[in-house]
Every structure is written in structure tokens, then in C-alpha cells.
Amino acid sequence: MSTSNNVQYYTCREQLLKVYDESARQYGLKAEDAESHSKWKSEVRALLADITGISRMRKCELLPKVLERKQMDGYMREKVVIQVEEGVWMPFYILIPDDIKEGEKRPCIIAAHGHGSCGKYAVAGRTDIPVVKRVIESSNVDYGLQLVKKGFIVFCPDARGSGERREWMNQGEEESKMMESSCFQLNNAAISLGRSLTGMWTWDLSRLIDYIETFEICDPDRIGCCGFSGGGLQSIWLAAMDDRIKCAIVSGYFHGYRDSLLKTNFCGCNFVPHLWEYVDMGDIGALIAPRPLLIESGANDPLNGERGLTDVKEQLEITKTAYKLYGEESKLYHHVFEGGHRWDGEKAYEFFAKWL
């Protein structure tokens, strides 16, 4: 029960917290060495592929189409669309540095966007769109643009439900509509069909890797990913489920499910049937070990939950356990900056330059 303005409400959150405490992490990290971690990883990946619906998705021809090319200051911006499932298309920008030499292959980064960024536009630095410019100024989320200026080839995709992939109820080019997403509607429909938005996002980015492997100026052995907030969700899941990702940055999205999701009001894209019964965020991170992983946390980010960085550090300890099994603790980084919910990026270039 709770009371607000002298009105009593008969709520059930406390009961759900009790259920969580009794049933959470049934498949959490359990390993004593690298070999048993590898076995646990295979088992949990199969389990997550099942509950997210990834195991029921089917590949099709990518059928890539280049829709536009525009020369920018120091790089070329291409807009491409590929087919990720039959009849389902994903548009994305490719940001290509001008100084690539003939025959050279560069490392590539998938830069996933979060909510309220107008899809790929903010990550790709589309400051010619006024609402996107304001988002970039407030949250520093043009990390795709920042990285291409450091010499990386960067892929900035629209996630299902955002940008040019919004469903009918959120479509429109007025500023308020551009900021919207169709996450709740898509996830509600998906979980009724044995799928999830988390699974569809992860699938789409794996299909993007399929495309990157055909792109002649990309080095298929040097692919990384990064993302802020909802883009952090995409980044950690992609790296956890696809070993072709050699290193990953997760910003503004590394916290325990109990503190940050069960106790708050987050977007529907965060929710997968049975997920909390099986693993916690630290276990998802443990699936990435021993590949390099950088976690970026704002000291005052409300998404960390009511216990703040204490919650984040508890999840990091779970992940760190996996890295210790390989003697690779130095490949797990945690950068804490003063500030709230935003992309910081102070360590991003140094991290990618070292590991890609």
C-alpha cells in the first residue's frame, strides 16, 4: 500500500519485489574457469535467444540499396537500406573518412542510438535539423560523428520503432513526432508472438554485421559497437550474443534490473519475458568476457537507480568475475564521470584505438 495526497492506494510493487528476490538469476554466472565459462555462455546464449525470439528469426537476402551520398567535412555520408528479415528493412548511415587509401581496410564501429535522439540522426551529427541539434547539445550524442573524425568507419542504424522505422502512430516530420518511438507498441505485439523488441534489435544489428563483412573497405576482424542509453542496451546485447564484435562501449545502461527497471518506469523495450528470472545485467556483461568492454556511468544518472553507483558496481562485480577466469580483468573498464544521463565519451577513442 502507499499514500499520496491523503489517498490510499493498494499497489503490488512490494509483492513483485519479493517475487524478484525469490526467483531472480536462476541462470546467473556459474563458472570456475575459462572452460566452464564457455559452457555457461553457450547455454545462456541459447536460453536468451529463445526468450527474446532471436531463435525464431530467419535470415534472408540483404539486398542493400544506396539511397544517397553526401560529401561532408572530412568524410562521406552514405544512406543505405538492407533487408533484415523478409519484408523488414533497416536504413542506416555509413560515415566514411576521406583519407582511406586504395586497398586499405579500416576498423568499423556500429553506433546505436538511444531514445529521444530522432533515431540515427543525432548519432550521425545531423545538426542541420534543429531538434536534433538541441538533442546533441544537451546529451553529447553525436558519437558517430565524433568517431568518424577519429578515422573509424561508423555505421549509424535506425532501431525498429525509431527514426525512419517508426510505426504509423508515431510517424510525422514535426519535431515532437521525430522525437517519438514505437517501442511500447512494438514490444507489446512482439511478446504476444514469442518475440521481443530487444531480440529484434539484436537480430538487426547482427544482420548489419553480415553486411559490414561484405563492405570492401571494412576489416571484418575489427568491428566494435557502442551506444548510449537505449543504444547501450543494443550495444551490450549485440556484444553478448555475437562474438564478431571485438569490443564494446555501453554508456548510460549498466545497472541491476531490480533497482533500475523494476523500481522505475522505463520504456517497454527493456522488458523480455522471464529475463529477470534468468539473469541480471552483470550476467549479460559476463557473456562478453574476455573481449574488451568499457562501461560509462554518470555519477548522477537517475537510471542507476535509488542506490546510484552502488548498484552499478554490484553488477560490475558479476561481470568482473568472468574476466578474472581468463586473467583478463584489465579488459574490463569502468569510466565514471561527473554528470547525469548523457554520453561522455572521454575514454571512447582511446578504447577503440587500442582494441580495434
Image (cartoon, helix red, strand yellow):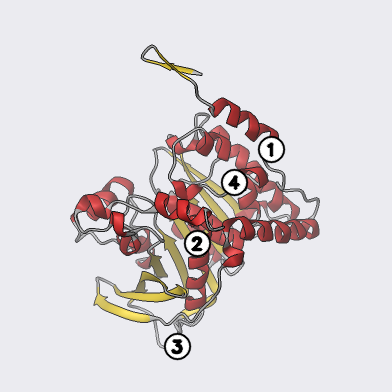
Amino acid tagged 2: Met
Q: Quadrant of residue 25?
A: top right
Q: Nearer the viewer, residue 271 or 25?
A: 271
Q: Is residue 58 above or below residue 297?
A: below
> Can you identify the residue that label 1 sits on?
23
- Residue 86 visible, this orientation: yes
Please tell me which residue is depicted at 72% across the width and 44% down the height of the picture.
Answer: 26
Residues tagged 4 and 3 counted as in contact (Cβ below 8 A): no
Among numbered discs 1 and 4, the one appearing first in the sequence: 1
Query: Spatial distance from mark 2 to mark 1, Cα to Cα?
Result: 26 Å
Query: Spatial distance from mark 3 to mark 2, Cα to Cα?
Result: 34 Å
Amino acid tagged 1: Ser
Q: Is residue 82 above or below residue 303?
A: below
Judge from the rendering whether residue 324 lies leftward or rightward of residue 162; answer left or right: right
The label shown at residue 281 is: 4
Amino acid tagged 4: Met
Q: Nearer the viewer, residue 142 or 327?
A: 142
Whole-percent x and y of residue 135? Answer: 28, 50
The label shown at residue 103 is: 3
Among numbered discs 2 and 4, the one appearing first in the sequence: 2
Which mark's residue is nearer the viewer, 2 or 4? 2
Residue sitting at the far top: 6
Residues tagged 2 and 1 counted as in contact (Cβ below 8 A): no
- Residue 242 visible, this orientation: no
> Can you identify the residue that label 2 sits on?
200
Which mark's residue is nearer the viewer, 1 or 3? 1
Please tell me which residue is depicted at 54% across the width and 77% down the height of the picture.
Answer: 220
Q: Considering the numbered disc 2 on the image, is that residue within a helix, a strand or a loop? A: helix
